[in-house]
Image (tube, grey):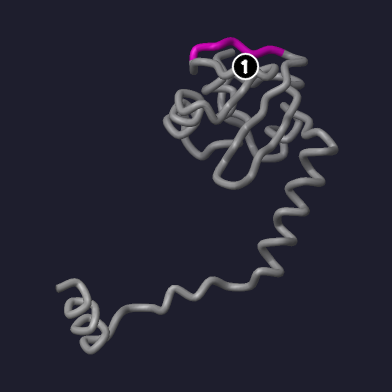
Amino acid sequence: MRVDKWLWTARLFKTRALAAGAVRGGRVHVDGVAVKPSREVGSGDELEITIGPVRRTVIVRGAAERRVSPAEAAKLYEETEESVAERERQAEVRRLAGPVDLGGRPTKRDRRRYDAGRR
């Protein structure tokens, strides 16, 4: 099965287009090698998938002809122990960092100050 289609059927990406884009962008490696979306994957292949700041390492256990339920999709792969531990560590770091305050929408006064600073 194609790697982009497998990523979509295993529900690691929301759409097949996003999966294909990630593969083309070099964010998916099969057995340590960056691949094209048409690369065939089979049982036993190790995939390294980077989605945003999160990197997951999964081992392919099976394939499905069409997209299946999340419970069935979880049976298509096995995530490595190191990958799970790293994801949990990153989640804890994000949780401890607290919310990011972007300041909200600028007021008219803020806009005037910003424009004055640009001139």
Is 22 a magenta residue?
A: no
* Residue segment shown in magenta: 38-42
Decide which of 39, 50 is in the foreground and name it: 50
Q: Is residue 5 above or below residue 15?
A: above
Amino acid marked by disc 1: Val
Residue drawn at x 82%, y 46% as measured from the top left? 85
Q: Is residue 69 above or below residue 99?
A: above
Decide which of 104, 109 is in the foreground and name it: 109
The image quadrant where one finds the C terminus is bottom left
| Residue linked to disc 1 | 33
Decide which of 116, 1 is in the foreground and name it: 116
Residue found farthest to the bottom: 109
Quarter location, residue 96 = bottom right
Decide which of 70, 46 is in the foreground and name it: 46
Q: Is residue 90 above or below residue 80?
A: below
Residue drawn at x 71%, y 57% as measured from the top left? 91
Quarter location, residue 6 = top right
Residue drawn at x 77%, y 46% as measured from the top left? 86
